[in-house]
Amino acid sequence: TTRVLTGITPSGTPHLGNYVGAIRPAIAASRAQEIESFFFLADLHSLIKSQEPERTQRSTLEIAASWLACGLDPDKVWFYRQSDIPETTELMWFLTVVAGKGILNRAHAYKAAVDKNREEQLDDDAGVTAGLFMYPVLMAADILIFNADKVPVGRDQIQHIEMARDFAQRFNHIYGKEYFTLPEVVIDEQVATLAGLDGRKMSKSYHNTIPLFAPREELKKLVFSIVTDSRAPGEPKDTEGSALFQMYQAFATAEQTAAFAAAFAAGIGWGEAKQQLFERIDGELAPLRERYNALMAEPEKIEAILRRRGQQLREQFAIPLLKELRHAVGLRDLS
Ligand code: TYM
């Protein structure tokens, strides 16, 4: 069997980009035969950005409920919280001591912070925590602790998977055994990056997101606020570079998309196009939204699932692996 693993950082409410780029493809893939799936809530990663305890907790719960509402079966796939597997942070240290600092200097998130500081003529590392710098090493530990074969993610995460391969390779090489499988990145070419309301990548940091379970009326309002050009009804519209068209595609079959493209060429008005997009999205999400609201009313059920699965994962994989690794690097066994 192939092990497929992916994580989502619980910082804020999940949005359509997370759904299209991660949740939906991961759940669809988890239903295939010969696949062992690992989905987790990267709550340790969320501490890098948010140091508000209530928010971290709330958002972990919301994201857990989202995955469950989207059809994840917690008895068939491994569904857990990163922080419930403390062996991950121990593994992170073993990777830290083999990871090249130069590689981490090139990580997108860190580089973006440095570039921003330079623009504002501040010190390169002003306000940058070591946590942000080490982000890719923690992520590598998430992947390697369960020896994942495949990691489905959005494009923004490709570099991190490459780093995980690099650290794994170095560790294997130094300690002389294939302790770690080299993970492969999996990108859904169709809709690798969903655009947000303003046409840029949908992202919490751009404030251009559509929350996954926004109530119907709010969803409608947001869809109608997607930026379009100023072409009038009757004028042909470009599908190329249209956030609206791309979003439609993410929620439609190939035939529906072809019909929508034809309507663009025939000069559909933006209002009508938005109405059609809204109905497509709402059609797919309405039943999920209902399940989500039901789950959020019983958080203790979600908590019980996460705890049970986390404990099983530790016993079956994480504790035995760390025992082996401690031995490999020359540390004493804890047991
Ligand atoms: P995060 O929480 O930023 O995003 C979760 C997943 O959603 C994808 N994504 C998108 N895909 C398409 N269009 C978008 N607009 C969009 N926005 C986000 C992301 O690429 C990601 O796949 N570091 C990770 C979480 C993580 C992880 C891991 C993932 C921690 N450890 C190990 C895989 C393996 C993150 O912050 O994703």
Image (tube, rainbow, N blue to C red):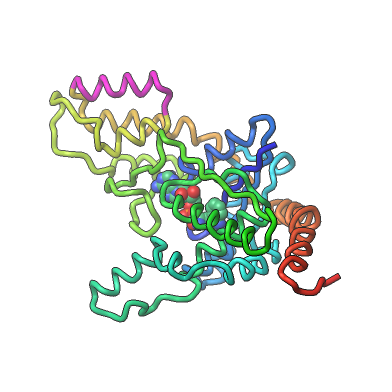
Q: Tell me if residue 308 is in the magenta stretch.
A: no
Number of on-image labels: 0
Measuring from the top left, give residue 179's x and y in whole percent.
69, 55
Quadrant of residue 127 within the rendered picture: bottom left
Q: Is residue 254 left or right of residue 303?
A: left
Residue at 51% x, 41% y is: 186
Above/below status of 334 relative to 179: below
Measuring from the top left, give residue 90's x and y in whole percent.
67, 69
Above/below status of 9 relative to 75: below
Q: Is 141 or 191 nearer to us in this picture?
A: 141
Confirm whether residue 59 shows in the render: no
Residue at 58% x, 33% y is: 28
Q: Main secondary structure of the magenta part?
A: helix
Confirm whether residue 18 shows in the render: yes
- Residue situated furthest right in the rendering: 335
Q: Is residue 228 left or right of residue 162?
A: left
Magenta-colored span: 252-266
> Which quadrant does the C terminus fall into?
bottom right
Above/below status of 50 relative to 76: below
> Which quadrant does the N terminus fall into?
top right
Quadrant of residue 42 within the rendered picture: bottom right
Q: Is residue 25 left or right of residue 254?
A: right
Measuring from the top left, give residue 269's x and y in whole percent.
20, 28
